[in-house]
Amino acid sequence: MFCWACVFMQRVQDILIVFGEMKALGCILMVPAMLSQVLASLPFMFDIGEVRTDDFQPQQIHIAIGESAQDMVITWTTPSETSLSVVEFGRESLNDSAHGIALSFTDGGSEHRKMWIHRVTLKDLLPDTRYFYHCGSPLGWSEVFVFKTWKNGTDWPVSVAMYGDMGAVNAQSLSRLQKETQNGMYHAVIHVGDFAYDMDSDNARVGDEFMRQIQPIAAYVPYMTCPGNHEYAYNFSNYRARFSMPNYEDTESFFFSWNMGPVHFIAVNTEAYYFLEFGLKPLSRQYEWLINDLEEATKPEVRAEHPWIILFGHRPMYCSNNDHDDCTRVNCLTRVGLPLIHTYAMEELLDKYGVDLAVWAHEHSYERLWPMFNYTVMNGSTSEPYTNPKAPVHFTTGSAGCDEIHDHFMPEKPYWSAIRSIDYGYTRLKVYNTTHMYWEQVSDDQLGQLGGRHLLLNGLRFVTTVQFVLK
C-alpha cells in the first residue's frame, strides 16, 4: 500500500536539508515557498475522497392536472434524497398538507448523475379556487406559489398557450410566456414536444436548467406536454422521469387526455412511429387507446358536453418546409401508418371521429392549413372555406425558440397551405363556448404582435356546421 504520510515526511526532510545549507536571510525568504510545497502535499496525504454536499432544496417545480380537474399533481426535483415529499397548501394559509413519493432518476450519460423526482397529488380541490402552496420537506422548502383550479362544468371560456420546440438557449418566447402566465392569461400551457435541446445534454444539466427556466410558468398553471424527437435519448428517460401527466403511472406521460370546459384535449406520442428500436408495443398500445378514447369522446351525451376535440402531438402530418422532414412526404408515417402495411394510420381516425383541430410542432415555424384530408382540401365553399369544413384543420406551432433557429419554407406555397411564418412565436388558443373557438399566433420578432387570427364557429363539424372567420 502506498504511504502518503511517507511522501509528506520526505518533503519536510528535503526542506530541512535546504534550510541547513542556506544562510539565515535566505532561509527567511524561502519560508513562503517551502510552506506552499508542504501544503500542496496535504491533499495527497489525506485520502478524503470527493467532497460531497447534500442539497435538499426543491427546484424545477411544475404542476399538471391529475385524474380529474379536482386533482393537481405537484412535481419537483432535489439533488439529494429526502425522507419526505410534502406539499403544504391552502386558500389563505398553508394549513393543509399532502404527502407523496420520491423516485430516484439516474441519467444515462457518462456521469450517471442521480436526482430525486418528487410527486404529490392534491385531491378533491374546490373548483374556481385560488390555492397557495410550497413543496419540500423539513430539510428544505420552496418559495410559495399559487394556482387557480378550473371551473366546474363546461360553460366557461378556456384559454391556453400552445407551442413546441423551446430550448434552454434562444428561448425567444419564454419571457413573454412567463409574464402572461403570471398575469393570469392562461388556464394551462401546452408544450407540444422538444424540450431544452436536449434534456439529456451535459449529463442532464441542460434539462435541469430548462426545467428551472419554465418554473415561472409551470409552477402556476398546469404545464401539459407530449414527447418530441429531442427527448429520445435513453428511451425517453428524462421525459418519462420529469413529467407527470394524467395517468402517468400507466402511460409514462406519452399519451393521455383530459376535459377542460367544453374541450376534450388528446395528447399523442408521434415518436412511437419513428423510434421502433424501442419496440412496436408503445405504438400499438397507443393506437388502441386512441380509438377507445375517441369512441368515448364522441358518444352523443359526452360530445354534447365537450363538443370540441383538439389533438396534439409533436410531428405534423403535413408541412411545406424545405428540410425534407417526414411531413413533407406524401406517405408521412403519422398520417398513413407504417411503411408497406400502413397499419396504425392516424389521419383516418381524426377524420372518422370528427377531430376539430390537430396541433403539431417539430418544424420551427408556424403554418396553418386549409381543412384537409388525404391531401384533398375540403373547404365548405369557395367564398367561405371554413364554413362547414369536411375535414380537420391542422396547424404547426414549433417556433418558440431554440438553438437550431428557424426551419424555412419551400419557395412556392402548396395549394393546401393557408398561412406560413418563420417568426419566433407561440399560439394563444381560446375556446369561448360550445360554438366559438379562437386562436392567434404571437410573433416575438414583432414584439408580441399577432401574426394571424382565426375564429372557428359552430363546432362539432359532423353534427352541425363549422365556420372559420379570418380577422
Image (cartoon, grey):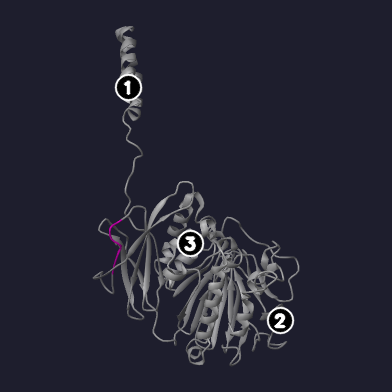
- Amino acid carrying label 1: it is Phe
Decide: is 67 above or below 16. below
Q: Residue 377 — which label? A: 2
Say which quarter of the image contains residue 380.
bottom right
- Amino acid carrying label 2: it is Val
| 393 relative to 259 in the view: left or right | right
| 417 relative to 254 in the view: left or right | right
Q: What percent of the width, then of the height, locates residue 160?
A: 49, 75
- Label 3 vs 1, first from the N-terminus: 1
Mark nearer the viewer, 1 or 2: 1
Q: Is residue 86 magenta?
A: yes
Q: Would residue 236 be seen by someone viewing this image from the given angle?
A: yes
Q: CA distance from mark 3 to mark 1?
A: 50 Å
Q: Would residue 186 be seen by someone viewing this image from the given angle?
A: no
| Point 28% across, 60% down: residue | 84
| Point 44% across, 59% down: residue | 211
Q: Residue 8 — which label? A: 1
Q: What percent of the width, then of the height, locates residue 415?
A: 74, 76
| 65 relative to 324 in the view: left or right | left
- Amino acid carrying label 3: it is Tyr
Say which quarter of the image contains residue 332.
bottom right
- Label 3 vs 2, first from the N-terminus: 3
Q: Secondary structure at mark 2?
A: strand
- Per the rendered image, the range of residues in magenta is 82-88
Name the residue tied to disc 3.
239
- Label 1 vs 2, first from the N-terminus: 1
